[in-house]
Amino acid sequence: MKAVITVTGKDSVGIIASVAENCSKAGVNIIDISQSVMKEYFAMIMLVDIDGLNTEFGEFVDRMTRLGREHGLVISTMHEDIFNSMHHI
Amino acid sequence: MLNISDIIETINMIREENLDIRTVTMGISLIDCAGDDVKSVCSRIYDKITKNAERLVPVCNDIEKQYGIPIVNRRVAVTPVSLIGGRFSPDDYIKIAHTLDEAADAVGINFIGGYGALVQKGCTKGDDALIESIPYALAETGKVCSSVNVASTKAGINVDAIRKMGEVIKKTAELTAGEGSFGCAKIVVFANVPEDNPFMAGAFHGVSEPETAINVGVSGPGTVASAIRRAGNCGLTELAETVKRTAFKITRVGQLVASEASTRLGVPSGIVDLSLAPTPAVGDSVAVILENMGLERCGCPGTTAALALLNDAVKKGGVMASSHVGGLSGAFIPVSEDAGMIAAAKSGALTLEKLEAMTAVCSVGLDMIAIPGDTDVYTICGIIADEISIGVANTKTTAVRLIPAVGRKVGDEINFGGLFGSAPVMSVNRLSPEGFISRGGRIPAPIHSLKN
């Protein structure tokens, strides 16, 4: 199973590193990253594999949300099924 | 493979355009709770609801987190209560209302529907006692909602029941006068009521439904309004296509949540209700959708046509996205719950008569409309009878949720707070239908009901 992590906010040093570190701690494998910086704003979409997740998915979502808050970013973590069901028949 | 623009579109719909799941409603049959002794009936009802809906709230919370989509309401709908207490007095029914309220508190839901009766052809003793008890039950409880079906295309219109409901609405307004007659926001009078509607205040668990079922109501007026704005100055056919595509996407999320909730709770999935349910939040308005189509203000000439296009396109887009479509399925036009409708009513662009015309082409009826507290009971009955006739003649659901707010007059505004919003008191035609309504009896079913 996969999930999509989106990170938006003001650019700063180490955003990708801290998100990746948290993924690794939770047993989440990063499959793909797409990121762009427009002026000082940062936007990243990360596709991750959650099969090896070592905690509840809800707990991982909360952890990422908290991480975002600590860094002044908005991080949302959503199961891939919501995108698949909305955009694929 | 996921595509970045699809991901961004979904996230924008949720974050910027107020896309949400409006309600996950668990239907629970209370047929096996019936009995002679009200105390044991209440105890069986409490046990059945709290046992079956025990995990409803935590499961919805988990789904909300998993998919990142807000689920605004978790609710329970039960068998029309008049069917399980045929021998009870109004006081006994009020005890059942308290039990429903306590069960709702225990499982952490915000409303419980089904305190009602199906009387399109006539009232049993139990129906009469329940209807008599409604004002007191609603005044004494917080979460109980009531709906009474007074007509159907097959049975015709029970005008005696309409007369009783006119009195019930007036009495409820008096008993809850301190809260802006809020009790009336919890009563709906229906024609052709759907038995699997997940939306309050009209939700109940129909007699042909299974033991339990999960019904989901989707929302998303903000998403449709934005899609229309983005479509620019296109033709009406293209506009309808835009609405269809958006409704499809919204409904797919509803279907996902419905099947996930059903699997996790071990309860059969019932229906997805494809409705555009507005909220008072800015940008979450059905009136704004109509205005984005090109109307100067909701209520102006052309409004009914625009609403007909919207309602039809929502259904066409949604129907392929869901395995079972049901409930009310269409655009809702509750005045107090829609910032655009409130503005249109205040400016005088939207009148009660125009709203009545609009209900001929959309899913519900005269919904959440505040009228002066001194409106005569026969006038209320006349408004109900007119609206119900539209449903019966057109083989569709219509409903009335009027709030004759005690002590308020045209131009006042009543703030109910939260999703109920704020209702401008609207003007009512004061000429009396008393002679017609007081004839009583039943208006026969229309000729096109004879289809066999």
Image (cartoon, rainbow, N blue to C red):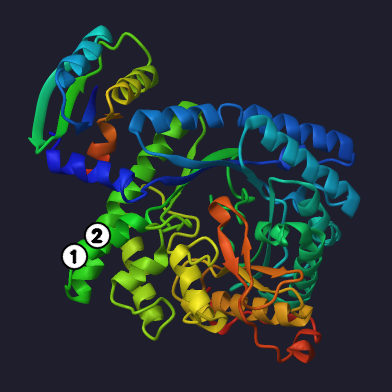
Which amino acid type is marked by label 1? Answer: Ala
Task: Please tell me which residue lies in front, B244 or B224.
Answer: B224
Q: Is residue B14 above or below residue B105?
A: below
Spot occupied by residue A63 in the image (x, y as percentages of width and height):
34, 18
Quarter of the rendering containing residue B400: bottom right
Name the residue located 55 percent from the left edge and 58 percent from the top edge.
B421
Task: Please tell me which residue lies in front, A20 or B236.
Answer: A20
Quickly name the residue at label 1: B231
B188 horizontally vs B377: left or right: left
Tag count: 2
Spot occupied by residue B116 in the image (x, y as percentages of width and height):
72, 55
Badges 1 and 2, same chain: yes
Mark 1 neighbour density, 10 Å: few (under 14) some (14–19) many (20 or more): some
Spot occupied by residue B180 in the image (x, y as percentages of width and height):
71, 61
Q: Tell me which chain the residue with mark 1 is part of.
A: B
Quickly name the residue at label 2: B227
Mark 2 neighbour density, 10 Å: few (under 14) some (14–19) many (20 or more): many
Q: Tell me which chain the residue with mark 2 is part of.
A: B
Spot occupied by residue B200 in the image (x, y as percentages of width and height):
59, 53
Helix or strand or loop: what does disc 2 sit on? helix
Indicate the quadrant containing the N terminus of chain B: top left, top right, bottom left or bottom right. top left
Asked if the residue under mark 2 is in contact with the one under mark 1, i.e. CB atoms within 8 Å, the reply is: yes
Q: In the rendered image, is residue B130 in sight?
A: no
Which amino acid type is marked by label 2? Answer: Ala
B53 horizontally vs B214: left or right: right
Helix or strand or loop: what does disc 1 sit on? helix
Q: In the rendered image, is residue B442 in sight?
A: yes
Q: Is residue A46 above or below residue B340?
A: above
Name the residue located 29 percent from the left edge and 37 percent from the top edge.
A82
B75 horizontally vs A45: left or right: right
